[in-house]
Amino acid sequence: MIKLLRYLFVEDFLLKLLSLVLALLFWLTVSFAIQEKQGSPTPVLRLIPEVRSFSNLPVVVMSSASDVRNFKVSPNQVEVTVRGDSSLLQNLHSKDIRVMVDLTDIEAAENLRKRIEVSTPAGVTLVSVRPEEVAVIIPSKSAIP
């Protein structure tokens, strides 16, 4: 049994490896030819996804409906970098990316900094946000009429 396995895998190893490589090249050639014939603009192999940046995206402040205070954040705009398929990124607009700060459970605080949350469409991955957090300016509840 061991002799049979050794014969199948070890004997003429270089010829078997060469056959495998040639078969792979043949398969790739046929796949690309079929895709070109069908007129598909996307290749079979997507090795490197594209990266795109969006500047001056407004930060949306999310608070509870019962809280009528006028929260402010500083800075109120950020830069977001995303990664994805080139066809997705070409059709992506800044309105498709949501940048927000969640302040639903904030009553009172001083020097509060909150992390920015970013939601992107399916197939698009967040790479970075600059800055990563914002300073929250909370008006006092006594200042509300």
Image (cartoon, rainbow, N blue to C red):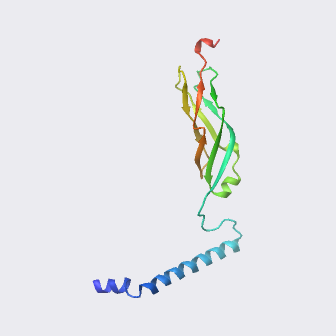
Above or below 53: residue 139: above
Q: Looking at the picture, how far across and down is residue 8, in whole percent? A: 37, 85
Residue displayed at 61% across by 54% down: 84
Above or below 35: residue 61: above
Q: Quadrant of residue 75?
A: top right
Q: Looking at the picture, how far across and down is residue 42, in whole percent? A: 66, 65
Residue displayed at 55% across by 24% down: 111
Location of the C terminus by quadrant is top right
Q: Looking at the picture, how far across and down is residue 38, in whole percent? A: 69, 71
Above or below 28: residue 53: above
Left or right of 7, for residue 105: right
Q: Looking at the picture, how far across and down is residue 59, in whole percent? A: 64, 34
State whether residue 9 appears in this view: yes
* Number of marks in the rendered image: 0
User: As drawn, which residue projects farthest toward the left?
Assistant: 1
State whether residue 1 appears in this view: no
Location of the N terminus by quadrant is bottom left
Residue displayed at 64% across by 74% down: 32
Residue displayed at 64% across by 22% down: 70
